[in-house]
Image (cartoon, rainbow, N blue to C red):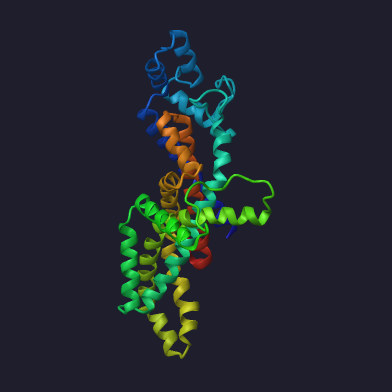
Amino acid sequence: MLVYSIRRLLAAIPVLLAASMFVFLLVDISGDPVAELIFQAEATGEPLSEEAQQEIAARLYHDRSMPERYWLWLTGWPGSAHNGDIGLIRGEFGPSTRGTAFDIGSDIASRLATTLRLVGLATLLGIVLGIITGVISAVRQYSKTDHIITFIGFLSLSMPVFWFGVLIKEVGVSINNAIGFRIFYTIGSQSPVREGYSAWDNFTDIAGHLILPTITLALVGYAVFSRFQRASMLEVLGSDYVRLARAKGLRNGTVMRRHALRTALIPVLTLVTIGIAGSIDGAVLTETVFQWQGLGRYFVDALGRTDTFAVMGFLMLSGTLVVVANLIADLLYAVLDPRIRYD
Protein backbone atom coordinates (compact mmCIF):
# COMPACT_ATOMS: atom_id res chain seq x y z
CA MET A 1 0.00 0.00 0.00
CA LEU A 2 2.89 2.36 0.82
CA VAL A 3 4.54 1.77 -2.58
CA TYR A 4 1.21 2.27 -4.32
CA SER A 5 0.64 5.54 -2.44
CA ILE A 6 4.11 6.87 -3.30
CA ARG A 7 3.63 5.89 -6.94
CA ARG A 8 0.32 7.74 -7.14
CA LEU A 9 1.82 10.75 -5.37
CA LEU A 10 4.70 10.96 -7.85
CA ALA A 11 2.26 10.64 -10.76
CA ALA A 12 0.50 13.80 -9.57
CA ILE A 13 3.62 15.95 -10.13
CA PRO A 14 3.62 15.92 -13.97
CA VAL A 15 -0.15 16.47 -13.90
CA LEU A 16 0.30 19.63 -11.84
CA LEU A 17 3.13 20.78 -14.11
CA ALA A 18 0.95 20.30 -17.21
CA ALA A 19 -1.90 22.12 -15.44
CA SER A 20 0.39 25.07 -14.66
CA MET A 21 1.40 25.34 -18.34
CA PHE A 22 -2.21 25.21 -19.48
CA VAL A 23 -3.40 27.75 -16.89
CA PHE A 24 -0.59 30.19 -17.66
CA LEU A 25 -1.05 29.96 -21.43
CA LEU A 26 -4.83 30.28 -21.21
CA VAL A 27 -4.78 33.33 -18.91
CA ASP A 28 -1.79 35.03 -20.51
CA ILE A 29 -3.29 35.07 -24.00
CA SER A 30 -6.75 36.11 -22.75
CA GLY A 31 -5.78 39.57 -21.45
CA ASP A 32 -2.99 42.11 -21.03
CA PRO A 33 -3.10 43.70 -17.53
CA VAL A 34 -0.71 46.50 -18.54
CA ALA A 35 -2.93 47.55 -21.46
CA GLU A 36 -5.96 47.39 -19.15
CA LEU A 37 -4.32 49.70 -16.57
CA ILE A 38 -3.31 52.14 -19.30
CA PHE A 39 -6.90 52.10 -20.64
CA GLN A 40 -8.35 52.70 -17.16
CA ALA A 41 -5.99 55.63 -16.60
CA GLU A 42 -6.98 57.19 -19.93
CA ALA A 43 -10.67 56.69 -19.09
CA THR A 44 -10.24 58.74 -15.90
CA GLY A 45 -8.63 61.58 -17.88
CA GLU A 46 -5.18 61.04 -16.32
CA PRO A 47 -3.15 59.09 -18.91
CA LEU A 48 0.05 57.42 -17.74
CA SER A 49 3.41 58.72 -18.89
CA GLU A 50 5.72 56.49 -20.89
CA GLU A 51 7.93 56.05 -17.84
CA ALA A 52 4.96 55.03 -15.66
CA GLN A 53 3.83 52.51 -18.26
CA GLN A 54 7.30 50.95 -18.30
CA GLU A 55 7.35 50.77 -14.50
CA ILE A 56 3.99 48.96 -14.47
CA ALA A 57 5.16 46.55 -17.19
CA ALA A 58 8.31 45.81 -15.18
CA ARG A 59 6.39 45.32 -11.91
CA LEU A 60 3.99 42.88 -13.61
CA TYR A 61 6.91 41.18 -15.44
CA HIS A 62 5.45 42.12 -18.82
CA ASP A 63 8.85 43.40 -19.92
CA ARG A 64 9.83 39.73 -20.28
CA SER A 65 8.96 37.18 -22.96
CA MET A 66 6.10 34.74 -22.37
CA PRO A 67 8.36 31.69 -21.68
CA GLU A 68 10.41 33.76 -19.23
CA ARG A 69 7.23 34.96 -17.47
CA TYR A 70 6.05 31.36 -17.12
CA TRP A 71 9.39 30.30 -15.66
CA LEU A 72 9.33 33.19 -13.22
CA TRP A 73 5.72 32.50 -12.24
CA LEU A 74 6.48 28.83 -11.63
CA THR A 75 9.87 29.05 -9.94
CA GLY A 76 10.68 32.68 -9.11
CA TRP A 77 14.24 31.80 -9.94
CA PRO A 78 16.49 33.87 -7.65
CA GLY A 79 18.10 36.76 -9.44
CA SER A 80 15.47 36.88 -12.19
CA ALA A 81 12.50 37.95 -10.08
CA HIS A 82 13.41 41.53 -9.12
CA ASN A 83 10.75 41.96 -6.44
CA GLY A 84 10.88 38.44 -4.96
CA ASP A 85 7.08 38.36 -5.16
CA ILE A 86 6.70 35.57 -7.71
CA GLY A 87 7.31 31.83 -7.79
CA LEU A 88 4.55 29.24 -7.14
CA ILE A 89 6.88 26.62 -5.70
CA ARG A 90 8.04 29.23 -3.18
CA GLY A 91 4.44 30.14 -2.28
CA GLU A 92 4.48 33.47 -4.13
CA PHE A 93 1.60 33.96 -6.58
CA GLY A 94 2.93 37.12 -8.25
CA PRO A 95 2.14 40.86 -8.12
CA SER A 96 -1.42 42.18 -8.17
CA THR A 97 -2.63 44.82 -10.62
CA ARG A 98 -4.20 46.61 -7.63
CA GLY A 99 -0.76 47.73 -6.44
CA THR A 100 2.20 46.71 -4.30
CA ALA A 101 0.15 46.91 -1.09
CA PHE A 102 -1.93 43.89 -2.15
CA ASP A 103 -0.57 40.38 -1.75
CA ILE A 104 -2.35 37.65 -3.74
CA GLY A 105 -1.07 34.86 -1.49
CA SER A 106 -2.45 36.54 1.63
CA ASP A 107 -5.77 37.28 -0.10
CA ILE A 108 -6.15 33.66 -1.19
CA ALA A 109 -5.14 32.33 2.23
CA SER A 110 -7.67 34.56 4.01
CA ARG A 111 -10.51 33.40 1.75
CA LEU A 112 -9.51 29.74 1.42
CA ALA A 113 -11.05 28.62 4.72
CA THR A 114 -14.37 30.25 3.83
CA THR A 115 -14.57 28.50 0.46
CA LEU A 116 -13.32 25.13 1.72
CA ARG A 117 -15.96 25.23 4.44
CA LEU A 118 -18.65 25.60 1.80
CA VAL A 119 -17.18 23.25 -0.83
CA GLY A 120 -16.27 20.53 1.68
CA LEU A 121 -19.67 20.46 3.35
CA ALA A 122 -21.58 20.64 0.05
CA THR A 123 -19.50 17.85 -1.50
CA LEU A 124 -19.95 15.65 1.56
CA LEU A 125 -23.69 16.30 1.62
CA GLY A 126 -23.98 15.59 -2.11
CA ILE A 127 -22.05 12.30 -1.80
CA VAL A 128 -23.96 11.02 1.24
CA LEU A 129 -27.39 11.91 -0.16
CA GLY A 130 -26.46 10.59 -3.61
CA ILE A 131 -25.26 7.22 -2.28
CA ILE A 132 -28.23 6.75 0.05
CA THR A 133 -30.87 7.65 -2.54
CA GLY A 134 -29.02 5.70 -5.25
CA VAL A 135 -29.02 2.52 -3.13
CA ILE A 136 -32.70 2.94 -2.18
CA SER A 137 -33.60 3.59 -5.81
CA ALA A 138 -31.76 0.45 -6.96
CA VAL A 139 -33.16 -1.82 -4.24
CA ARG A 140 -36.71 -0.61 -4.99
CA GLN A 141 -36.30 -0.51 -8.77
CA TYR A 142 -39.39 0.69 -10.71
CA SER A 143 -41.32 1.37 -7.48
CA LYS A 144 -42.92 4.72 -6.62
CA THR A 145 -39.90 5.54 -4.48
CA ASP A 146 -37.58 4.87 -7.43
CA HIS A 147 -39.66 7.07 -9.74
CA ILE A 148 -39.75 9.93 -7.20
CA ILE A 149 -35.99 9.78 -6.61
CA THR A 150 -35.37 9.62 -10.36
CA PHE A 151 -37.63 12.64 -10.94
CA ILE A 152 -35.84 14.65 -8.23
CA GLY A 153 -32.47 13.66 -9.71
CA PHE A 154 -33.32 14.81 -13.22
CA LEU A 155 -34.95 17.96 -11.85
CA SER A 156 -31.74 18.74 -9.95
CA LEU A 157 -29.64 18.17 -13.06
CA SER A 158 -31.76 20.59 -15.07
CA MET A 159 -31.65 23.51 -12.60
CA PRO A 160 -28.83 26.08 -13.00
CA VAL A 161 -26.97 26.73 -9.73
CA PHE A 162 -27.48 30.50 -9.76
CA TRP A 163 -31.23 30.17 -10.40
CA PHE A 164 -31.66 27.59 -7.64
CA GLY A 165 -29.60 29.83 -5.33
CA VAL A 166 -31.92 32.79 -5.89
CA LEU A 167 -34.96 30.54 -5.46
CA ILE A 168 -33.78 29.03 -2.19
CA LYS A 169 -32.95 32.49 -0.85
CA GLU A 170 -36.58 33.48 -1.39
CA VAL A 171 -37.71 30.31 0.40
CA GLY A 172 -35.38 31.05 3.32
CA VAL A 173 -36.66 34.61 3.66
CA SER A 174 -40.27 33.37 3.54
CA ILE A 175 -39.63 30.85 6.32
CA ASN A 176 -37.89 33.49 8.45
CA ASN A 177 -40.86 35.84 7.99
CA ALA A 178 -43.37 33.08 8.73
CA ILE A 179 -41.81 32.08 12.05
CA GLY A 180 -40.81 35.63 13.00
CA PHE A 181 -37.25 34.60 13.71
CA ARG A 182 -34.17 34.47 11.48
CA ILE A 183 -32.87 30.93 11.02
CA PHE A 184 -31.53 31.23 7.49
CA TYR A 185 -29.05 33.93 6.50
CA THR A 186 -29.03 34.94 2.83
CA ILE A 187 -26.09 37.38 2.68
CA GLY A 188 -22.46 36.84 3.68
CA SER A 189 -20.63 33.96 5.33
CA GLN A 190 -20.68 35.38 8.86
CA SER A 191 -22.19 38.30 10.76
CA PRO A 192 -19.86 40.99 12.14
CA VAL A 193 -18.61 39.98 15.59
CA ARG A 194 -20.59 41.86 18.22
CA GLU A 195 -19.79 42.58 21.84
CA GLY A 196 -20.69 39.70 24.11
CA TYR A 197 -20.59 37.14 21.27
CA SER A 198 -19.93 33.69 22.78
CA ALA A 199 -18.35 30.73 20.98
CA TRP A 200 -21.81 29.13 20.69
CA ASP A 201 -23.24 32.34 19.18
CA ASN A 202 -20.40 32.35 16.67
CA PHE A 203 -20.99 28.68 15.78
CA THR A 204 -24.75 29.09 15.26
CA ASP A 205 -24.15 32.24 13.23
CA ILE A 206 -21.74 30.46 10.87
CA ALA A 207 -24.08 27.44 10.64
CA GLY A 208 -27.03 29.72 9.79
CA HIS A 209 -25.04 31.33 6.99
CA LEU A 210 -23.95 27.90 5.69
CA ILE A 211 -27.30 26.15 5.31
CA LEU A 212 -28.70 27.73 2.14
CA PRO A 213 -25.42 28.00 0.14
CA THR A 214 -24.55 24.40 1.08
CA ILE A 215 -27.90 23.08 -0.13
CA THR A 216 -27.50 25.07 -3.35
CA LEU A 217 -24.00 23.78 -4.03
CA ALA A 218 -24.76 20.18 -2.97
CA LEU A 219 -27.29 20.07 -5.77
CA VAL A 220 -24.38 20.05 -8.24
CA GLY A 221 -23.12 16.66 -7.10
CA TYR A 222 -26.17 15.00 -5.57
CA ALA A 223 -28.01 14.15 -8.79
CA VAL A 224 -24.88 12.77 -10.51
CA PHE A 225 -23.87 10.66 -7.50
CA SER A 226 -27.42 9.35 -7.14
CA ARG A 227 -27.74 8.21 -10.76
CA PHE A 228 -24.31 6.57 -10.82
CA GLN A 229 -24.88 4.84 -7.49
CA ARG A 230 -28.21 3.46 -8.72
CA ALA A 231 -26.70 2.11 -11.95
CA SER A 232 -23.69 0.64 -10.14
CA MET A 233 -25.84 -0.96 -7.44
CA LEU A 234 -28.19 -2.53 -10.01
CA GLU A 235 -25.24 -4.07 -11.82
CA VAL A 236 -23.83 -5.55 -8.62
CA LEU A 237 -27.23 -6.85 -7.42
CA GLY A 238 -27.56 -8.78 -10.68
CA SER A 239 -24.12 -10.38 -10.40
CA ASP A 240 -23.56 -14.11 -9.77
CA TYR A 241 -21.79 -13.74 -6.43
CA VAL A 242 -24.66 -11.72 -4.95
CA ARG A 243 -27.17 -14.35 -6.12
CA LEU A 244 -24.91 -17.04 -4.63
CA ALA A 245 -24.75 -15.18 -1.32
CA ARG A 246 -28.55 -15.05 -1.22
CA ALA A 247 -28.82 -18.71 -2.21
CA LYS A 248 -26.58 -19.59 0.76
CA GLY A 249 -29.23 -18.07 3.01
CA LEU A 250 -27.47 -14.86 4.05
CA ARG A 251 -29.75 -12.12 5.32
CA ASN A 252 -30.57 -9.37 2.83
CA GLY A 253 -28.95 -6.70 5.00
CA THR A 254 -25.73 -8.72 5.20
CA VAL A 255 -25.67 -9.22 1.42
CA MET A 256 -26.18 -5.52 0.85
CA ARG A 257 -23.62 -4.34 3.39
CA ARG A 258 -20.83 -6.88 2.90
CA HIS A 259 -21.12 -7.88 -0.75
CA ALA A 260 -23.10 -5.37 -2.81
CA LEU A 261 -22.52 -1.89 -1.42
CA ARG A 262 -18.73 -2.14 -1.09
CA THR A 263 -18.33 -3.23 -4.72
CA ALA A 264 -20.88 -0.71 -5.97
CA LEU A 265 -19.00 2.16 -4.33
CA ILE A 266 -15.84 1.64 -6.43
CA PRO A 267 -17.16 3.17 -9.71
CA VAL A 268 -18.82 5.98 -7.75
CA LEU A 269 -15.48 7.00 -6.26
CA THR A 270 -14.45 8.04 -9.76
CA LEU A 271 -17.01 10.79 -9.48
CA VAL A 272 -15.55 12.23 -6.30
CA THR A 273 -12.99 14.15 -8.34
CA ILE A 274 -15.69 15.38 -10.70
CA GLY A 275 -17.86 16.26 -7.74
CA ILE A 276 -15.18 18.41 -6.13
CA ALA A 277 -14.34 20.09 -9.44
CA GLY A 278 -18.04 20.79 -9.96
CA SER A 279 -18.36 22.17 -6.43
CA ILE A 280 -15.44 24.55 -6.96
CA ASP A 281 -17.00 25.76 -10.20
CA GLY A 282 -20.37 26.03 -8.49
CA ALA A 283 -18.81 27.92 -5.57
CA VAL A 284 -18.02 30.80 -7.94
CA LEU A 285 -21.73 31.25 -8.68
CA THR A 286 -22.95 30.38 -5.20
CA GLU A 287 -20.63 32.86 -3.48
CA THR A 288 -21.74 35.53 -5.93
CA VAL A 289 -25.44 34.87 -5.27
CA PHE A 290 -25.02 34.77 -1.47
CA GLN A 291 -22.35 37.53 -1.46
CA TRP A 292 -19.70 35.45 0.28
CA GLN A 293 -16.19 36.86 0.36
CA GLY A 294 -14.62 33.54 -0.60
CA LEU A 295 -12.32 32.41 -3.38
CA GLY A 296 -15.17 32.22 -5.90
CA ARG A 297 -16.03 35.88 -5.40
CA TYR A 298 -12.31 36.73 -5.42
CA PHE A 299 -11.95 34.98 -8.78
CA VAL A 300 -14.88 36.92 -10.29
CA ASP A 301 -13.44 40.22 -9.02
CA ALA A 302 -9.96 39.33 -10.33
CA LEU A 303 -11.40 38.59 -13.77
CA GLY A 304 -13.06 42.02 -13.82
CA ARG A 305 -9.76 43.72 -12.94
CA THR A 306 -7.68 41.63 -15.42
CA ASP A 307 -5.60 40.66 -12.39
CA THR A 308 -3.92 37.82 -14.25
CA PHE A 309 -1.70 36.51 -11.43
CA ALA A 310 -4.72 36.38 -9.10
CA VAL A 311 -6.74 34.49 -11.72
CA MET A 312 -3.88 32.04 -12.28
CA GLY A 313 -3.49 31.58 -8.54
CA PHE A 314 -7.17 30.65 -8.15
CA LEU A 315 -7.08 28.26 -11.11
CA MET A 316 -3.91 26.54 -9.90
CA LEU A 317 -5.33 26.17 -6.41
CA SER A 318 -8.53 24.68 -7.87
CA GLY A 319 -6.50 22.31 -10.03
CA THR A 320 -4.39 21.26 -7.05
CA LEU A 321 -7.52 20.51 -5.00
CA VAL A 322 -8.85 18.34 -7.84
CA VAL A 323 -5.54 16.47 -8.11
CA VAL A 324 -5.50 15.90 -4.33
CA ALA A 325 -9.11 14.65 -4.48
CA ASN A 326 -8.13 12.32 -7.32
CA LEU A 327 -5.23 11.03 -5.26
CA ILE A 328 -7.52 10.35 -2.29
CA ALA A 329 -9.98 8.58 -4.59
CA ASP A 330 -7.17 6.36 -5.93
CA LEU A 331 -6.14 5.44 -2.40
CA LEU A 332 -9.74 4.62 -1.50
CA TYR A 333 -9.91 2.38 -4.59
CA ALA A 334 -7.02 0.40 -3.21
CA VAL A 335 -8.73 0.10 0.18
CA LEU A 336 -12.02 -1.12 -1.33
CA ASP A 337 -10.40 -3.37 -3.93
CA PRO A 338 -6.88 -4.61 -2.95
CA ARG A 339 -6.24 -5.92 -6.50
CA ILE A 340 -5.87 -2.34 -7.74
CA ARG A 341 -2.73 -1.63 -5.73
CA TYR A 342 -0.91 -4.48 -7.52
CA ASP A 343 -1.79 -3.34 -11.08
* Rendered-image quadrant of the N terminus: bottom right
Q: Residue at x 40, y 75 (%)?
A: 136
Q: Is residue 107 left or right of residue 44?
A: right
Q: Position of residue 200 (x, y in %)?
A: 66, 57
Residue 218 in sight: no
Q: Is residue 19 left or right of residue 5?
A: left
Q: Residue furthest top?
A: 50
Residue 280 in sight: yes
Question: Which image quarter: residue 29?
Answer: top left
Number of numbered discs on residues: 0
Q: Residue at x 48, y 72 (%)?
A: 262
- Answer above or below: position of 236 versus 161: below
Q: Position of residue 208 (x, y in %)?
A: 54, 56
Question: Which image quarter: residue 137?
Answer: bottom left
Q: Position of residue 132 (x, y in %)?
A: 44, 71
Q: Position of residue 205 (x, y in %)?
A: 58, 53
Along the viewing direction, whichever of 123 and 249 lies nearer the viewer: 123
Question: Which image quarter: residue 26?
Answer: top left
